[in-house]
Amino acid sequence: MRAALLQLTSSDDPVENLAVVRAWMGDAAADGAEIILTPEVTNCVSTSRTHQRAVLNHESDDPTLAALRAEAERLGVWLLIGSLALKTHDPDGRFANRSFLIGDDGAIRARYDKIHMFDVDVSPEETYRESDGFRPGTRAVLSDTPWGKMGLSICYDVRFPHLYRRLAQAGAEILTVPAAFSHVTGAAHWQSLLRARAIETGCFVLAPAQTGTHTASRGQARRTHGHSLVIGPWGEVIADGGTEAGIITVDLDLSEVAQARRRVPSLRHDRDFDGP
């Protein structure tokens, strides 16, 4: 399995971001990538709900989704769109933070709405209330691919290990964690969390990330951690994208999943217990 992770510095302009992703998809495919993965909020990094309402679309008429599906089909590659910010028909007007797995025929093979909302106070100067603008998903998602079963997640989900254990026990061999991770929490926790999820599940973890300072036409500019990571099922760091935007390409042997799980079969060792 040859995978390419796109590490982006997306702005709050979906048209501009789409042009970058399409160009880099072409470069990745030319380098032999069979599956390409993009970060969270590939289409629009914005802290302004007013701006989001002006530029976002519903899934059915989102130009980024339509164009990337067509590009995956044209290139003959699978594509994990880490997530798109999308309008919904919810009465409260909140958006969806939705990941898409696209087949090499351009068909949508799976959708996943981010379950855990990033509502935190990192510091007095850095607070987030994702649930003010986005509604949480309610369903874990596992999908077949030509290489093995893939479990989908997004960013803050990585702090909730029970989600990944459920996915792995249901058959996941690959876990995706596209992110726009905070610069502060990323420096402290990003790699440790991803390695832990890989070790606990014996899965490959593919985590394409946003990086740098994101241009904003309205609202406060965000800064993200970068360091897109590929982690092996034994917990080893296979690739680290650093802090520059670019393409990270890796060759993965999925037989290593079974090998890691034979060595430490902890997915079969759950026990019921009392308390606390």
Image (cartoon, helix red, strand yellow):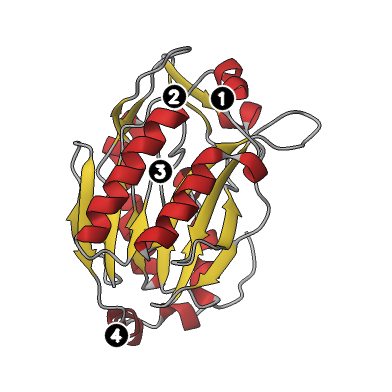
Say whether residue 176 is visible: no
Q: Earlier in the sequence, mark 4 or mark 2?
A: 2
Earlier residue among tags 3 and 2: 2
Q: Mark 2 touching mark 1, by CB under 8 A?
A: yes
List x then y, in percent, for residue 192.
Answer: 30, 51
Front of the two marks 3 and 4: 3
Q: Pointers 3 and 4 in contact (CB under 8 A)?
A: no
Q: Earlier in the sequence, mark 4 or mark 1?
A: 1
Is label 2 in a helix, a strand or a loop? loop
Judge by depth and name the residue closer to the eye, 137 or 272: 137
Residue at which label 1 appears: 55
Few, some or many residues within 10 Å of mark 1 (<14, 14–19, 20+): some
Q: Residue furthest front?
A: 74
Amino acid type, mark 1: Val
Of residues 67 and 261, the one drawn nearer to the viewer in this rendering: 67
Most foreground residue, 267 or 19 = 19
Is 86 displayed left or right of 125 in the figure? Answer: right
The label nearer to you, 3 versus 2, is 2
Q: Which residue is mark 4?
A: 259
Q: Earlier in the sequence, mark 2 or mark 1?
A: 2
* Numbered circle sitting on residue 12: 2
Q: Secondary structure at mark 1?
A: helix
